Image (cartoon, rainbow, N blue to C red):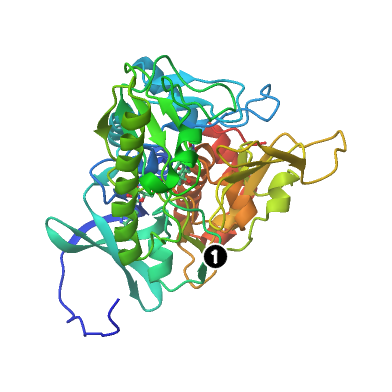
Amino acid sequence: MIEMHIEEPAKRIPVYDEADICVLGGSCTGVFAAVRAARLGARVVLVEKQNAFGGVATSGLVNIWHSLYDTTFTKQIIAGLTWETIERLARVDAVRAEEKSHSAGYALNTEELKIELDRLVLESGVKPYLHTAFAAPYVQDGELKGVIVENKSGRGAILARQFVDATGDGDLCARLELAHRVSPQFQPSTACAKISGWGEGGGMPEDDPREGGLKGLNLNEARLKHREAYDLPEGFGWGRYVPGTKGIYMYAGTRVYHADSADGEQLTHAEIEGRRQVRAVMDLIRDHGPDNRIALVALPSYIGTRETRHVEARHRLKGSEVLLGTAFDDAIASGSYRVDIHHQDKPGLTFKYLDGTEVYVRPGYPHAVGRWRPDTGDSPTYYQIPYRSLLPQGPYPNLIMAGRMIDVDDEAFGGVRVMVNMNQTGEAAGVAAYLALHQDRPLDTVDPSELRRTLREGGSIML
Ligand SMILES: Cc1cc2nc3c(=O)[nH]c(=O)nc-3n(C[C@H](O)[C@H](O)[C@H](O)COP(=O)(O)OP(=O)(O)OC[C@H]3O[C@@H](n4cnc5c(N)ncnc54)[C@H](O)[C@@H]3O)c2cc1C
């Protein structure tokens, strides 16, 4: 970036809308926040910069939701809008259950997810704004009164009493100059791709992401062997057949290291580099696995960003609290997905399980299996996310966050970041915003037991 500045002239802009609650960012996290608040009776505006809702799942092509059960797969711990959406997708043959797996719970046709999310939004009376990007906060006399957005109509304002930042990157919190950090080990980005003609049959063997079903080609071994010829960084690749299609495979196997998606120039580089790597993988398969008559069907609308900013909140959730299953009085979400750290400083990833097992996976090499703690014979079967980790520090009592920017350390992030968990933070943020509005109180004084009761009444499981 050039170190130069200009003064942007002040100007009058129209007010596009006025609402009780404004939700920024429309992945399932944001949609679920908006829908839960609207179902309780709030007038909600939902702002999304893409042409569709769903975030990484739809615009980024990532088509796996993880288990809704605890680690024993006997006790359901997640329901709410995640379960409702799965049921809705099942009616149009757009979901395939992969039960009792640590790798996946449900494979989704995320094109259908776009349509179901449209329906959910409209049925609940949420006012949607697509193709609309949040640009700046509107603060008057120290109070957050609105947001300034940009869309085809130009620049305008949305005024509201409560705000949910569900932009993934914490754009609203960052522009409010709330304390935040980007971890030096932030997980790298991946451009996914949908590819037709990929082998035969469906899915990968349980917990064995090496094969991916290609005919006559072990892709991970081939990638390692021909890495330099195709200029493919070492990383990790996995994928899933898209439910309801014939042989269309969603492959997540590129790796753009050291590119922070919350930085405009680095994001631009990541997009172009991610697509180059998709092409390189295609070339490698064509050259070394010619029985696969592959064709590129879809690239993501934007590169899959695993991690950027985390905003400092009332509580930073620690890896130890996740891995030891710490119970919180103000728990608003439960999860069982293992800690899954895609490394920034070395190839591959590390899984840490609640039972104490640790596995380092480097494609093309044997898994390194060990333990992060001794085997005590007694392990938690799920973990929790506290409400406090959604409440940013700072002077804005009407602002809450939901999604991957919540306050978690590197290790905790590895587990809580998956969508079935982030979805719950959205639902909690929406319900909390409604309660704060309804009771005319700051978000940090919302009674956690009332929040949990209202979530439960709306279909969530609260443990
Ligand atoms: C390649 C990859 C593979 C993954 N694999 C899995 C997996 O298999 N299963 C799983 O559950 N999780 C997976 N994850 C993690 C998971 O997808 C994310 O952690 C999760 O989607 C984060 O949700 P979010 O709502 O916080 O962010 P996002 O899904 O990124 O949503 C943010 C939303 O806000 C919108 N937005 C952003 N900025 C603005 C703005 N300024 N104005 C308006 N709108 C804005 C975006 O367009 C987007 O819709 C993966 C992630 C990646 C990148």
- Whole-percent x and y of residue 70? 66, 30
Q: Position of residue 255 (x, y in %)?
A: 43, 49
| Residue topped by disc 1 | 184
| Percent position of residue 439, x then y | 50, 54
- What is the secondary structure assignment of the residue under circle 1? loop
* Residue 347 shows in this picture: yes
**What residue sits 72% from the left and 50% below the top?**
321
State the residue in front, 291 or 243: 291
Q: Tell me which residue sits at (45%, 49%) in the image.
A: 233
Q: As displayed, is residue 390 above or below residue 351?
A: below
Quadrant assignment, res 216: top left
Q: Residue drawn at (48%, 54%), measured in percent from left and top? A: 307
In-front residue for pair 108/75 = 108
**How many numbered marks are there?**
1
Quadrant of the image containing the N terminus: bottom left
* Residue 339 screen position, x and y as percent: 63, 44
Q: Quadrant of residue 193?
A: top left
- Residue reaching furthest to the left: 153
Residue at image location 29% in from the left, 22% down from the top: 293
Of 163 and 247, nearer the camera is 247
Amino acid carrying mark 1 in the image? Pro
Residue 244 vs 24, above or below: the answer is above
Q: Residues within 10 Å of mark 1 (few under 14, many from 20)?
A: few
Q: Quadrant of the C terminus?
A: top right
Mark 1 near ligand 1 (CB under 8 Å)?
A: no
What is the quadrant of residue 140 in the picture? bottom left
**Do we see residue 124 in this rendering?**
no
Q: Is residue 344 above or below residue 240?
A: below
